[in-house]
Every structure is written in C-alpha cells, then in structure tokens.
C-alpha cells in the first residue's frame, strides 16, 4: 500500500508576497508559524491529517494527496508521483512537496 510524504518545501512571508506594503488585512506575523521548513509528515490514507500539520493547509492540499494515492502522475512534474502544492493563506503561504512512496 502506498504512503504519501509531505515535506514543507518553502515558507513565504508577507514581504515575499507584497514587499514593504502588505495589505492591512494581513497580520504582523511575517510567515506561517504552524510548520517548519523541511518538516516531514508521512500519511497512509488520503483523509489522514497528520499530527502537527495545520488542518487548514491539509484541507488545501488534500486533492493532490488523494490523486497520489490513486496513482496519478502529473505530466508537468519531472518526477512521477511528485507534486508541489500550497496552502491558500494569501498573506504567508506554505509550499509543500508531496511524494507517493510505494511499499
């Protein structure tokens, strides 16, 4: 049975997104504090939000995770069974590398 590894690939800050003029709606937190760069999570089911991963981010990347569990490959990615996906935080998004791991 396949597993999916979720790796925090990049964390973008308010400054990365908007320079020195972030929208007033953005908090003063410069980047997401929920996960750390390079942090990894392994899941064995598409609906399994791993402990320590933001549930909002998991909801955003869950479609790609389900596709990986179904064996789908993305033609625009160089490596089969891999996709980059991100959370939808418009002020400080996090980019995740998702990898199918075959047993």
Image: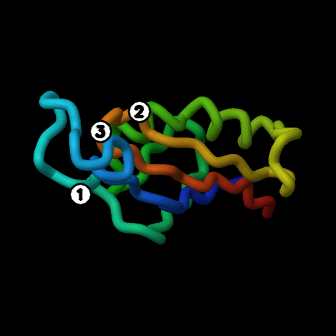
Residue drawn at (32%, 41%) of the image: 18
Q: Is residue 88 above or below residue 69?
A: above
Residue 76 coordinates in the image, percent (x, y): 83, 41
Residues at marks 2 and 1, CA–CA distance in whole angstroms = 15 Å
Tell us which disc is closer to us: 3 or 1.
Answer: 3
Image quadrant assignment for residue 25: top left
Q: Is residue 11 above or below residue 56?
A: below
Mark 2 crowdedness (10 Å alpha carbons): few <14, some 14-19, many ≥20: some
- Of the numbered discs 3 and 1, the one sitting upstream in the chain is 1
Q: Which residue is mark 2?
A: 88
Residue 101 coordinates in the image, percent (x, y): 74, 60
Residue 26 coordinates in the image, percent (x, y): 18, 36
Mark 1 crowdedness (10 Å alpha carbons): few <14, some 14-19, many ≥20: few
Q: Is residue 58 rendered to the left or right of residue 7?
A: left
Residues at marks 3 and 1, CA–CA distance in whole angstroms = 13 Å
Q: Is residue 73 rendered to the left or right of residue 82?
A: right
Query: Circle 1 sits in a helix, a strand or a loop, which is it?
Result: loop
Q: Is residue 54 above or below residue 6?
A: above
**Which numbered marker is on residue 73?**
none
Query: Circle 2 sits in a helix, a strand or a loop, which is it?
Result: loop
Assess whether mark 1 and mark 2 are in contact (beta carbons under 8 angstroms): no
Q: Which residue is mark 3?
A: 91
Mark 3 crowdedness (10 Å alpha carbons): few <14, some 14-19, many ≥20: many
Model colouring: rainbow
Q: Quadrant of the C terminus?
A: bottom right
Residue drawn at (54%, 34%) of the image: 62
Assess whether mark 2 and mark 3 are in contact (beta carbons under 8 angstroms): no
Q: Which residue is mark 1?
A: 33
Toward the viewer: 50 or 26?
A: 26
- Of the numbered discs 2 and 1, the one sitting upstream in the chain is 1
Residue drawn at (73%, 42%) of the image: 68
Tell us which disc is closer to us: 3 or 2.
Answer: 3
């Amino acid at each position: 049975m396949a597993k999916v590894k979720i790796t925090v690939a990049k964390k973008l800050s308010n400054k990365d997104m908007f320079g020195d003029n972030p929208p007033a709606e953005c908090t003063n937190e410069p980047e997401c504090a929920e996960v750390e760069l390079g942090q990894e999570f392994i899941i064995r089911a598409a609906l399994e939000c791993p402990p320590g991963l933001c549930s909002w981010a998991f909801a955003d990347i869950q479609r790609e995770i389900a596709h990986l569990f179904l064996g789908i490959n993305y033609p625009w990615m160089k490596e089969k069974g891999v996709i980059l996906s991100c959370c939808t935080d418009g002020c400080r998004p996090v980019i995740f590398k998702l990898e199918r791991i075959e047993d």
